[in-house]
């Protein structure tokens, strides 16, 4: 029987590329998204990740139909940029709810299914979780949370055969760039916010294809003992490695020069 994979945020970007790639490779894929969508390669279900009840119903329905769930890929996410002092409380709440709280809640529900199959839980983080970016402080914080939650969860579920992996993409060319919410404060920061965002957008639109992340997810599912953490892209592995060796003050200085 084909392995059953559930992917959140599957209507676009990394989620869509991953769902299509896995479906082509013979996996039975169910893609979740908060809006109605369809794809000829995989099953599409409308479920907002911030509404745990709707995701729980979706997982339960998939389990009843397939009698198994072999992998859950937490991919849904959003971004906000700008000075944190100008970020609205609603936007701060929204990004933490979407990127981190929902991921934790969905993982807590998914574990019971994955214990049966000794399956995979793959959480999509970001290089920004290890190298926090100025004017993306909330986004960086959520992705750091994804990394640490994933590492801690591994300590809880490994004895049951559940394999937890966090995948950290660097700059990736997707619609995420255009969808990013930009807050105010430009006047007070002397044009630094605009320069920072333009740098981010340039790097993203000239970044790697989301197919590279999809390949990393596929390789993770194929490995008997997948790694706890995968950084996509050789240069990003180098950056993170150097950051571990250099003083924190120097790393932050470099990031400030690049993005602030």
Image: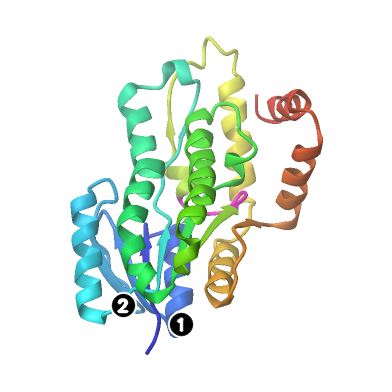
The mark tally for this picture is 2
Residue 68: numbered disc: 2
Query: How many residues crowd around disc 2 within 10 Å: few (fewer than 14), some, or many (20 or more)?
Result: some
Residue occupied by mark 1: 24
Query: Would you identify the image quadrant in which residue 197 lies?
Result: top right
Asked if residue 48 shows in the view, the reply is: yes
The residue nearer to you, when weighing 46 against 73, is 73
In this image, 65 relative to 10: left or right?
left
Residue 237: % across, % down: 73, 52
Q: Does the magenta segment cover residue 172? A: yes
Query: How many residues crowd around disc 1 within 10 Å: few (fewer than 14), some, or many (20 or more)?
Result: few
**In the rendered view of the protein, which quadrant contains the C terminus?**
top right
Residue 247: % across, % down: 79, 28
**Residue 85 higher or lower than 14, as above or below:** above
In this image, 81 relative to 93: left or right?
right
**In the rendered view of the protein, which quadrant contains the N terminus?**
bottom left
- Tell which tag, 1 or 2, sits nearer the viewer: 2
Asked if residue 17 shows in the view, the reply is: no
Span shown in magenta: 169-175
**Residue 51 higher or lower than 84, as above or below:** below
Residue 95: % across, % down: 38, 36
Marks 1 and 2, Cα distance to the nearest angstrom? 20 Å
Query: Would you identify the image quadrant in which residue 127 lies?
Result: top right
């Amino acid at each position: 029987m084909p392995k059953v994979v559930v992917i959140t945020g599957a209507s676009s970007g990394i989620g869509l590329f991953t769902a299509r790639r896995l479906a082509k490779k013979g996996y039975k894929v169910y893609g979740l998204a908060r809006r109605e969508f369809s794809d000829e390669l995989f099953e599409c279900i409308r479920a907002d990740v911030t509404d745990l009840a709707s995701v729980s119903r979706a997982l339960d329905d998939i389990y009843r139909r397939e009698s198994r769930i072999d992998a859950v890929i937490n991919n849904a996410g959003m971004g906000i940029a700008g000075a944190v002092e100008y970020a609205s409380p609603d936007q701060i709440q929204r990004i933490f709810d979407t990127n981190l709280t929902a991921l934790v809640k969905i993982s807590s529900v998914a574990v019971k299914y994955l214990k049966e199959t000794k399956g995979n839980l793959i959480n999509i983080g970001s290089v920004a979780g290890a190298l926090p970016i100025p004017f993306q402080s909330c986004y960086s914080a959520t992705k750091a949370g994804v990394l640490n939650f994933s590492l801690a969860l591994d300590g809880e579920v490994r004895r049951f055969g559940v394999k937890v992996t966090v995948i950290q993409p660097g700059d990736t060319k997707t619609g995420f760039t255009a969808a990013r919410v930009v807050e105010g404060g430009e006047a007070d920061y002397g044009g630094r916010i605009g320069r920072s965002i333009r740098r981010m957008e340039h790097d993203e639109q000239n970044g790697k294809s989301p197919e590279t992340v999809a390949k990393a997810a596929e390789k993770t599912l194929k490995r008997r003992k997948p790694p706890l953490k995968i950084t996509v892209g050789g240069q990003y592995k180098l950056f993170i490695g150097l950051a571990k060796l250099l003083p924190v003050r120097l790393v932050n200085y470099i990031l400030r020069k690049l993005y602030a």
